[in-house]
Image (cartoon, rainbow, N blue to C red):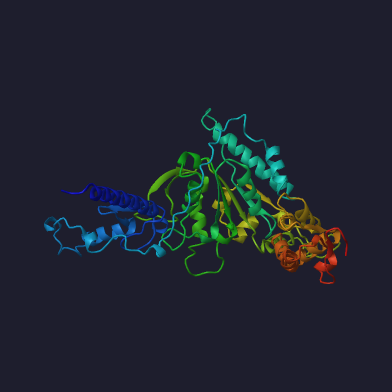
Amino acid sequence: MPNDTDDKTKENESINNKNSSNDNDKNNDDYENYCYLCRRPESSAGPFITLPGNMHVCNECMQKSFDAFNNNQMQFIDLSRMPNINMSQFMPFDDIPQSQKVKKKKKKEDKPEEAPLTLENIPAPHKIKAMLDEYVVGQEYAKKAISVAVYNHYKRVITNTMDDIEIEKSNMLMLGPTGCGKTYLVKTIARLLNVPLAITDATTLTEAGYIGDDVESILSKLLAVADNDVEKAERGIVFIDEIDKIAKKKETRSRDVSGESVQQGLLKIIEGADVEVPVGAGSKNAMTPMTTMNTQNILFICGGAFPDIEDIIKERLSKQSSMGFNADLKDRFDNEPNLMKEVTVDDLRDFGMIPEFLGRLPVIYTLDALDKDMYIKILKEPKNAILKQYQKLLALDEVDLKFDDSAYEAIAEKAMEKKTGARALRAIIEKFMLDIMYEIPRDDSIGTVTITGDYINGKGSPIIELRGTNI
């Protein structure tokens, strides 16, 4: 007769085995699945197909397997006569060591549902501009133009089906020298508004059939921002940066797959059409799911620095130069900082933009080049000004960071010499803040550090005040 103690020990062993198997299942759920054939994780290979025996195969490998069958490369295998064999007993499916597995990324918390747009809760242009004023210095005309465009876009989306009058969208082309705030302006709007906004780069786009992103990838990014909600994405805004990089090449004998061809591919998308868009991919292929998006209600904003277009404008303005008392001198525009304000559609066409593309961007405006006063304002006024960021970093070490007026002027003068716009400010500040950020954490007695213009110019040192005393 079996003992009761033996039965209890068997029950305890079975319970422990179940608990250990449950723990293993939980641990396995924390890690990504791998394709059994190509060994890529699910995050890079895309959704997997789960086969019997808990075997995972990516879509690409599955398609290659089907192609091998269709091409009669595996005709020696008679599937009808194969027995039902569990292959896992010969070759385990989960044979990747734990140390080589990748943990799944934590899912982001669900965002609260946004209130539906109505004519009553649309932010007015002056409110949008007021929000932009907190982050962007200067560029008054550009902020007004983009505020009105976004406001009209809201109204256009809401009233699109109210009557027979159809409001056309006003796509925009934004020009300005490097570092003047084109991309930053649109990124700020992306943070402040609830409408889906995708920022993409034109430099990676190529003609269909060539290596690179297709023009439909622009809409794929907008769809991803809208959480794959097609209806929500169809009322979004797209900002195409570096649009000047797809200008038509003037002297080339090869096919211009990343210039004029890309402009031609963007024509119907910008104007408004039903477009087949790959979901979660940059290009179309047989294994990528597709969806149809209508771009009629999508607002497109294009931006670019258009380097050397000043020479084209200068040449046009200097054509009337001649000899005499009323003649215009050819070098009159050489030192004009905001010469780009005189740009016309003809200048853009001479630069390399095709007329059909420019015709679909009716609103063209420029951003001002930065002067010394604007550099100083950029250092002081915005909510997330770079100097405020360093003050916050040192405040975590209980140190007060100050700048006198000579320091602001010295930083602005150095930034103007670099001629790279507002991007030069961080490079300059990083250089003179390096020693300060290195020394302060090692000395707890420092209470205040004041940066002077002499220190920035390399002629002195910062003024350091200890806690309760001055040096």
Residue 383 location, x and y as percent? 72, 49
Q: Which residue lies furthest to the top in this view?
A: 163
Which of the image's four quarters has the C terminus?
bottom right
Left or right side of 107 for 89: left
Q: Can residue 362 be seen in this view?
A: no
Pick whichever, 28 or 163, lies toward us: 28
Q: Residue at x 59, y 45 (%)?
A: 171
Left or right side of 351 for 87: left
Q: Residue furthest bottom?
A: 459
Q: Residue furthest left?
A: 81
Left or right side of 298 for 79: left
Q: Which residue is drawn at 67% across and 40% down?
A: 128
Q: Give the answer, above or below, for where 220 lies relative to 337.
A: above
Residue 386 location, x and y as percent? 72, 57
Pick whichever, 103 or 341, lies toward us: 103
Q: Answer with the quarter of the image where residue 409 lies.
A: bottom right
Residue 195 location, x and y as percent? 57, 41
Residue 240 location, x and y as percent? 57, 53
Q: How many marks?
A: 0
Left or right side of 106 for 432: right
Q: Answer with the quarter of the image where residue 168 lies.
A: top right
Q: Answer with the quarter of the image where residue 170 lies.
A: top right
Q: Give the answer, above or below, for where 251 lies relative to 350.
A: below
Pick whichever, 156 or 87, lies toward us: 87
Q: Is residue 168 visible?
A: yes
